[in-house]
Amino acid sequence: MSQVALDVGFVPLLDAGPLVIAHELGFAAEEGLELRLHREPSWSALRDRLLWGTLQAAHMLAPLPVTLTAGIGGMRVAVDALSVLSVNGAMIGVRPELAERMGASDLDFLDAFAVGRALVAAGGALRIGVPFPVSMHVELLHHWLASLGDGPGFELRTVPPPRMAEAVARGEIDAFCVGEPWGSVAAEAGAAQLVLPGAAIWRFAPEKVLAALHDWTEANPELAAALMRAVWRAGRWLAAPENVGTATEIMGRAEYLDVAPEILERPLRGRLVVNSRGEERRVPAAIEFFRGAATFPWRSQALWIAESIARRIGADRAALRSAARSSFRPDLYRAALGPAGADLPGASEKLEGALPHRTEVASTLGTLLLGPDSFHDRRIFDPS
Amino acid sequence: MNPKLSIAVVEQDRERALMIVDGLRDAGEYEVMVIGDVTGLARRLAALAPDVVLIDLESPDRDVLDALTMASTPTDRPVAMFVDRSDEAVMRAAIEAGVSAYVVGGLSRERIRPVLAAAIARFHVVARLRSELAATKAALEERKVVDRAKGMLMKAKGLSEGEAYALLRRTAMDQGKKLVEVAAALITAAELLK
C-alpha cells in the first residue's frame, strides 16, 4: 500500500509526544500515512509554515486556532483544532532566591492560593517568562494572579521554551510558566525552583492541539481522519505506565527534544524534582495524553479560552466566541474516532470546573470517567 | 517627502549581519541597524523604533517579535508581520529564503517590497555560505581524526603511512562503516586502554 506523506510541525516539548510516537511506533503507517516531522524553532515559524502550506498539520498551543480564526494578532485564517494532544504539563518556577523568600519548600505544591500568597508576601514586581503571547500559560497565569486580590504587579516576557532556564539564570526574568520538560530542565540546572504546576490552577486544562488549516481539513477529510486516529492511538500508548521508559528514550533523542530520558520521566510519572537539591513533589495528572477524554476537543474549553482572552485584551467577545465554536472540531473527532473505538461523551460542551472528583458521565460505550477538572478558585465556567 | 526607512536586522552572527546590511544598502537609501545581542530584544526595539525588522525565520527569538504584534497599550507603535497575500510568490520566496519581516506603523507595501526582495536575495547567499562553511569544517575535522588514528597505527604496529591508511580503509569496508567512524573508534579505544 502506498503511503501518503504529510509534513507535520512540532516545537520541542513533551506534548509533541503523540506525533512523535505516531511516527516512530508505526501508528501513522498503519493508517497509510508517512509523517515527515519538522522540528520548528519557534511557534511563529510553525504557524507561518502551516499558514503558507509547507506544513499540513501541526502541534499547536490550544488558544492559537481560536485567535487565528478570530483574526487577533494581525492574521485572520481559519484553523481547525482536530483533537487535543495533551492536557496540563505546564510548570511555574521562580528564581532560587525568590523561592527562598517565599519559603517555597514548605508550601503545598498543589495549593495555588498558598503559593500565590507567598509570592505576594515576597514582594516586588515580577517579570514572568512565557513561551508565546497566545498560550494557555498566559491565560492560566492571569487567572491565578487575578485571584490573589491585590496580587503582585507583573509583566510577561516572551522567552522560547528551551531558553527559559538560561533567561532566569541570567536574571532577565524572575519566574516562568513553561511546558515540560523545560521547567524540569531549569530545576535540574539549579536556575529555578518549581513552585506550582499549571494543573494546580486548572486541573484539566487543554494544553496543545492537533491543528490544520480549515481549508485543508475540508479538502482532505479522509487524511484528517487518518491522522486523528493515528495520533489518538499514539496518545493511548503514551498514557500507559508500562510504556514510559520506551517513550522517554524516543522523545529524548537529539532530533526530538535532546533531553535526558531521566528528566522526561518526571512529568510522565508525576514525580517532579523541584530544585537542584533533589526535593520531589507528586503531581496527579501532571500531563495527560488520554485519560478522562483528554483528547476530546470540547467546545466549552475553546469558549473558556475565548472569554479569557476577550477579558484580558479587551477584544471583541462575540467574534472570539464564534471563532472558538468553529475552530474546535468535536464533530470531526466523533466521525473519525467513534468507529475506531473511542468512548465518546454524550455532549460536546460542558460546564468547565464542575467536577471535583472523577465522575461517570453519559458516553457511547458507557465507560467514560471525566474529571477532576476544578479551578483553584472553585469557579465554574458555563459556556452558554 | 518620505523620510528614509529605518531597518533593524536581528542577527547574532556578525559576519552574516554585515552581509545582510550590505545587501540592503545596495538596494536603496535605508538607515540600517543591527541588533546582535538578543537579550531584552523587545526593549531594544522599542528604543530604536525601526520601521521594519528583519529576522531569520529559524531564529527562536522570532516569538519575541511576534509578542509585539499582540501589544495593545496605546503608546505602542503597532507592529505587524509583513504578509502580502496578494503576492503569493514573494511570500513563498521569503519563507524559502528563511526571512521574516515585521513592519511597524502601517507602511505601504510598495515601500516594503524592495526591502524584502533585497533581504531574500541576501539571506539566500548567507545560507549557502553557511552550509559550505559547515561542510568544510566537518571535512577538516574528519581529516584530523583519520590522521590521528593513522599516527597511532604507525607507532603501535610499525607501519608506513600508506599501510596504516590501507588498514583503516580495509577495516571500514569489512565492517560496512565510514573510515572516520573506524578512526574515531580506534582513538576512543586507545584512550580507554591508556
Image: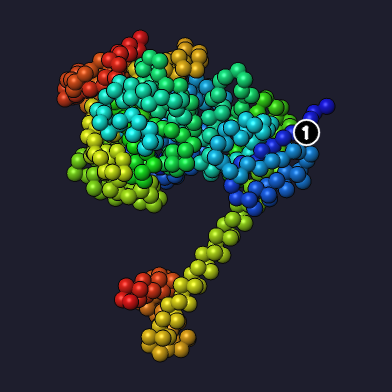
Instruction: Compare residues A184 and A253 and report the one nearer the observer.
Output: A184
Res. B192 image quadrant: bottom left
Kindly identify the residue that appears in the image at 28 percent across and 48 percent down. A262
Answer yes or no: is residue B125 visible: yes
Q: Which residue is mark 1?
A: B4
Instruction: Compare residues A154 and A6 and report the one nearer the observer.
Output: A154
Question: Residue A309, percent across and down?
Answer: 45, 19
Kindly identify the residue that appears in the image at 64 percent across and 24 percent down. B77
Above or below B22: residue A369: above
Say which element carries label 1. Answer: loop
Q: Chain of mark 1?
A: B
Kindly identify the residue that appears in the image at 59 percent across and 55 percent down. B130
Which quadrant, please, contains the N terminus of chain B?
A: top right
Question: Residue A360, percent across and down?
Answer: 17, 20
Q: Is residue A245 left or right of residue A117?
A: left
Q: Which residue sits furthest right?
A: B1
Name which residue type carries label 1.
Lys
Above or below A308: residue B81: below
Question: Residue B50, percent across and down?
Answer: 68, 33
